[in-house]
Amino acid sequence: MFFANSYTKSQEPISTKEFKKNYNLIIKKIKSIEQLPPFNVFRILNGEIEVILTPPTEIQFLNYLSILQDALNKYPTELIHQHLKEIFIGGSYHQNGGIISGLYNKDIVYLFYNSQDGDNSSTFLEQTFHHEFSSILIHAYDFPAFDWLKLNPENFEYIINPIKINEYMNSIETYKATELQLTQGLVSSYGQSNAENDINSYIELIFTQPKKMQALVNTYPIIKLKYQMIKKFYLSISPQFHTTFSF
């Protein structure tokens, strides 16, 4: 598998020590189930979920370090210091037959080389980080969730039920939103699952594909309103986000 703009053996390896020095951030490989979020570990041990976990290869780990270096540069350093303590990088992670690309727990993010449609590009892997870290910020700064729900069409409903979400995700071949979903204010089919994933999907697109986001904002009225809400929220966290939200 070729990774665009990724680490290769001929390049100087990026050290986890750099992240510790620059962000006071610890980055580790996931080698066992015990390293997953406590709630997931509890459910596994209790027989509620079945998982298949593989550790990352050295190339995968170093590639993700390179991607994280670019991703973290898009945030104020102090924000990372305050809200992100550890990042765990895994190989693949399947839960009850479904593919999991990322998880979060308090001030920890978990990242995997997984995607629903087989996309392990640098863009997708970076999006996974922004997706999970945005959940941490949403909870830390009280995102106006009820105002977000009011922007959805009157007849729109999120799936919400975890079992039905898993069935839905197994039934689709791509994260790409359909035309109907775009008119409903979704920028990703995954956003159909629940409100938090809907918000996450916006943020991952804003941070990695701003031109695509701007085109959607200029085309779909509900997407424009949701973008404006997220923009206001992030600028309230730090005015340094003005370059990210430049339109």
Image: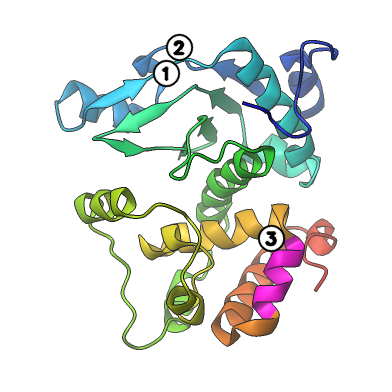
Give how far apart the Cα atoms at labels 2 and 1 are: 7 Å
Q: State the SS at label 2.
A: loop
User: Which numbered disc flags the more N-terminal residue, 1 or 3?
Assistant: 1
Query: At 76% from the left edge and 21% from the top edge, which residue is drawn?
Result: 7
Residue, disc 2: 31
Q: Which residue is mark 1?
A: 35
Q: Is residue 34 above or below residue 169?
A: above
Name the amino acid, label 2: Lys
| Foreground tag (2 vs 1) | 2
Q: Which residue was labeled with disc 3?
A: 206
Q: Are marks 2 and 1 in contact (CB under 8 Å)?
A: yes
Q: Position of residue 134 (x, y in %)?
A: 58, 51
Q: Residue at x 54, y 36 (%)?
A: 107
Which residue is rendered at x = 55% and y = 83% of the image?
222
The answer to whether residue 71 of the structure is visible from this angle is yes
Q: Nearer the viewer, residue 63 or 65?
A: 63
In terms of image quadrants, where is residue 244? Answer: bottom right
What amino acid does circle 3 point to? Ile
User: From mark 1 to mark 3, how far is it between C-alphas?
Assistant: 30 Å
- In the displayed structure, 224 sits above or below 96; it is below
Query: Residues in magenta?
Result: 210-217
